[in-house]
Image (spheres, helix red, strand yellow):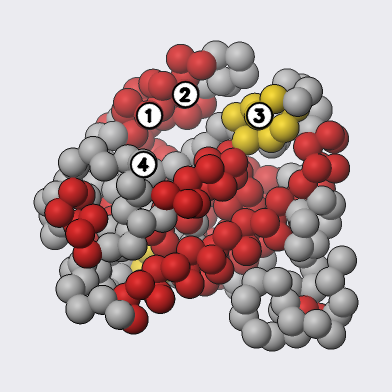
Amino acid sequence: MSERNSTCFCGSGKKYKKCHSDVLPESRAGILIKLYSELNETVNDYYTHQIEKPPCQKGCSSCCYQNFAISFIEAKLIMKELRKWSRDELNELMKITHDQIEYLKINRPDVYRNLEEDSTGRGAIFFEQIRIMGDSYGLPCPLLNVENGACRIYEIRPAICRTHGVSHRSDNLEDVEICEHIPSSKENSKRTPDIAQFTERIRNLSTIEYELKQMPIRMYPIVYWLKMMFNAYERFGEIVIPFEDREFSMSKTSADKMQGNDLYGRRR
C-alpha cells in the first residue's frame, strides 16, 4: 500500500492519507480512480493546445438524457459518494429513481423486463439490452440537476461521462450522431483527442478474471443501479455496497479469485 504521507495515486496532488486513504491503489476501485485521472489528463491536455473544440460546455446536459450503462465498480464508487449526502438528499434521489423505474414499467416494459432478467449464462440478454438501450426514452440521469444542467457527482462521474462528445476512438470510427449538437462522430473526431489507448482498460471495468478467462459482469443504467441500492437502503437504513472490502481494500487479482457470487450475492 502507498505510504500515507506520499502523494495520492489519484493524481490530485494531495497526500494519500488526506485523499483516498480508504482505497487500495491496486484494488478494482483504485484502478478505476487512476483511469479516471488519466482520462481527465488526456482530454484536458489536448484542449489546452486545440483551437477548435466540440460544443460541449458547462450547463449542457444533452448527453445526460441518453441511455447508457455503467460497470459495477463505477456504480460502487457512486454509492460510496452518496454516503456523503444528507438523508433529505437521498430521499429526493430515491423518489426520482422510483418515478423513473415506474415510467419504464409503464412506458417501456421491454426495457424494464430486460433489466430484471437474470443474465447468468444467457448472452442473448446482453445483446437485447444493447439493442433496446439504443432507443431514447427522454429521461434525465437521476444524478443530473435539471435546473442548472450540472452533474451532482461530477468528480466521480463514470468513464463514458468523461469522454462522450469530447473524445473519439480510432478503433471505432463508425459515423453516428452523438447528440443534437454533434451530428457526426467522424467530423467530431477531427477536433477531439483519441482515447483508443484506454479501450481495453475501459472494457475491463466490467469483467473479472475467472479460471484464467475474462468473464463479463453485466452493466446497468445508473437508474437501475440506484434502484438496487435503494432496495437495500430501505431495508437497512444505510447505503450498502456489496462486497465493499473486496473492491476497495483488496488487490484486483485477489478479489477476482474470491469472485464466487455475482454483485448481489447470487451464485454464478
Q: What residue is shown at x 40% (from left), y 75% (from top)?
A: 44
Instruction: Look at mark 4 in the image and give the residue it sits on.
Output: 171
Secondary element at image label 1: helix
Q: What residue is shown at x 85% (from left), y 42% (from top)?
A: 254
**For residue 93, side relative to residue 179 (left or right):** right
Mark 1 and mark 2 in contact? Answer it, CB < 8 Å. Answer: yes
Q: Decide: few, some or many residues near mark 4? Use Cα within 10 Å; few <14, some 14-19, many ≥20.
A: few
Comparing marks 4 and 3, which lies closer to the viewer? 4
Disc ID at residue 202: none
**For residue 100, side relative to residue 267 (left or right):** left
**As shown in the figure, which amino acid type bears the numbered disc 1?**
Ile
For the N terminus, the quadrant is: bottom right
Instruction: Look at mark 1 in the image and give the residue it sits on.
Output: 130
Q: Where is residue 241 in the image (x, y as percent from the top left)?
A: 72, 51
Comparing marks 1 and 3, which lies closer to the viewer? 3
Query: Mark 4 and mark 3: span between their CA atoms?
Result: 21 Å
Residue 106 in which image quadrant:
top left
Instruction: Look at mark 2 in the image and give the residue it sits on.
Output: 126
Location of residue 143 with respect to 170 vertically, above or below: below
Q: What residue is shown at x 12% (from left), y 51% (from top)?
A: 183
